Amino acid sequence: MKRIALTLIVALLALPAVAMAKADLVVVTDAPPKSMNPHAFSSDANLSYMSNFFDGLLQRPAPDGKLSPALAVRWERLDGTTWKFDLRKGVKFHNGNDFTAADVKFTFERMKDPQYSKLLNIANSIASIETPDDHTVIFKTVKPVPWFAETMHQNFIVDMESSKDRDDGDYNTRPIGTGAYKFVEWVKGSYVRMTANEDYWEGAPKYKNVDIRPITEEATRFAALAGKQADIVNGVPVTLIERIEKMPHVQLISRPARRAIYMDISNKEGTPFADIRVRKAIAHAINEDEIIEKVMRGQATPAAQVPDVPTVGYVPGLKRLSYDPALAKKLLADAGYPDGFAITVAGPNDRYVNDEKICEAVAKYLAKIGLKVTLDVKPKSIFFDELSDYKHRFYLIGWFDGSYDFGRSAEKLLHTPDKEKGMGAYNGAIYSDPELDKMIIDSSSIIDRAERQKALQAINKKSVEDVAWIPLHYQQDIYAVVKDSGVAFTPRPDQWIVAKEIK
C-alpha cells in the first residue's frame, strides 16, 4: 500500500502545472496533438483535437456516427464522378471572415500539397472543383469514389483569406476554423485550451472554457482521475480498472471499439517473410487468447480481420489462424528455417492500449518457436516517422476506417506503396501483391453497394489468406467520468473528444 500511495503522490506532483480554475471542463486524453494544421496528420488522435476548432462539410455526431449535415446542408451524387454540396449560409470563421465556397475550393486544393497535407488520398481523387456561387460546390473526381462523401467529416475547412499568406509556423500552431471552439493556447506536453464560439452555427456549446490535457503515462492519468484533476479521462488503463471501479467518485463507461490492433508484416523479396509459410508460422505462434486474458484483462475482442462489423467489406464468420506453436515450428522448418532467424518486433509504447506489453508478449511467443527476437518499441512520435521511411518489416499497429469502407483502408494499408498516387501510404512493412493491387483498383470504381460489398469482401479474404497482416483484437474504449462534475458524456465510435457534444 505504501508503494501505491507513493506512486500516486509522485504522479500527482508530475501533473502539468495548469491553472485549472480557468476551465469549466477538463478532459484528460492519452495522446497529444502533433500539429494544429488540420490536414497535417490523419491520425484520430490529431483529428480529435481538430474537430473542436474546425468543421467538415459533414459530421458524424455521437453516439452512432451517422453521416449528418455540417458546413453543407445537402449533398448528392449527380453522376459517377460528380458530387454537389449546398453550403450553409451565415457561417463565419473565428477571425470574422465569411465562410463561402471559395474556402472549400482552397482547402481541397491545398490538401493536394504534401507540404501541408497527409490527406493526399482523398485530395488527389479530385479532378476539379467548381463554385458556381458562394454556397455551392461541385466536385469532379478522377474516377468514381464510392466513399467520397463518407470522408467529409474529417476533411476540415480552413479560411482561404488568412491561410494562403500565413507563415507556416503560425499555420501549424494557431488554428482558425468555423468550429464550436476557438483556439486560446497550446502548451506542448501540457494542455490545449479553447473557448466557446458563441456565434457557432449550431448554437453556443455548453462549456465556455475547455482544457484538453494529453497525458501519455498511465500512472499520471490515473493520478489525475484519483485527484479529481479532470472531469473526463479517456484511455483508462486496463491494468487499473479494478482499482478505479472501487473509487466512489468515478463512473466507468466502456464500449466496443472499432479499432483493430494487428501485426503488420512484409512479404518483401529477400526476406524470410516472402515465404507465406513463414508468415503463417508467425501467426500460429501468437496466443491471442492469452493476450486478451492477461495483457488486456479481458478488455478486448479477438479479431480475424482488420475491418469491423459496420464496415463495408467485413466478412462474417472469417476465422483467424489458430494458436499452434508445433505447427509454427514445422512451417519454419519446411520454409528452410529449422533454427529460426533474426526478427525485430517493433511498435509504439504510447499509442494503443497496452501496446508495449502486447509487443512483449508477441516477442515471447516468437522466441518460443526458435526465432531470435529483438524488441524495438518507442514513443509514437518517433515510431510513426520510422514507418514513413519503411524501416520496419514486422510491427504492431492499429486501424479503423472513418469512412466505414474497407476499400479506402485497402488503398492505404494493402496496396503496394506508391507515394505519387497516394496509395499504400500506411503500408509501412511493404507488403505487395499485384493481384491484390488490381482487385483494389478495380473495386474503387464500384458504386453499387451490394456489388461493392462483394468485391471488398474478396479483398479482405485474400489479405487474410495470404497473411498480409496478423489481426489480434478489437480494442475496448474505456472512459472515466467524475460523478460530481455534472458531465453527461457519450463516447463516439471514432474515440474523438468533441467538446460540443458533452452536455
Image (cartoon, grey):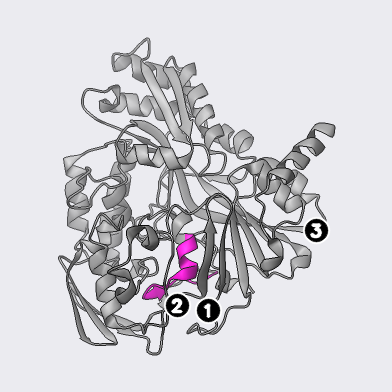
The disc at residue 94 is: 2
Viewed as shown, does residue 97 lie left or right of 187? Answer: left
Q: Quadrant of residue 314?
A: bottom left
Q: How far across and down, in percent of the image, does residue 343 sit?
A: 38, 21
Q: Which residue is mark 3?
A: 249
Viewed as shown, does residue 291 lie left or right of 407? Answer: right
Above-or-below relation of 216 to 210 = above
Helix, strand or loop at mark 1: loop
Above-or-below relation of 445 to 343 = below
Q: How far across and down, in percent of the image, does residue 58 sit?
A: 39, 75
Mark 3 crowd level (few <14, some 14–19, many ≥20, 10 Å Cα): some
Mark 3 or mark 1, which has the lower sequence index? 1
* Type of amino acid under label 2: His
Which quadrant does the N terminus fall into? top right
* Type of amino acid under label 1: Asn
Between 474 and 195, which is closer to the camera in this rendering?
195
Q: How far across and down, in percent of the image, does residue 430 sit?
A: 27, 36
Which residues are drawn in magenta?
48-62
* Type of amino acid under label 3: His
> Contact (CB < 8 A) between labels 2 and 1?
yes
Q: Is residue 286 magenta?
A: no
Viewed as shown, does residue 231 lie left or right of 379? Answer: right
The disc at residue 485 is: none
Mark 2 or mark 1, which has the lower sequence index? 2
Between 75 and 188, which is closer to the camera in this rendering?
188
The disc at residue 197 is: 1
Q: Nearer the viewer, mark 3 or mark 1?
A: 1
Mark 3 or mark 2, which has the lower sequence index? 2
Question: Can residue 65 be spotted in the picture?
Answer: no
Helix, strand or loop at mark 3: loop
Between 404 and 173, which is closer to the camera in this rendering?
173
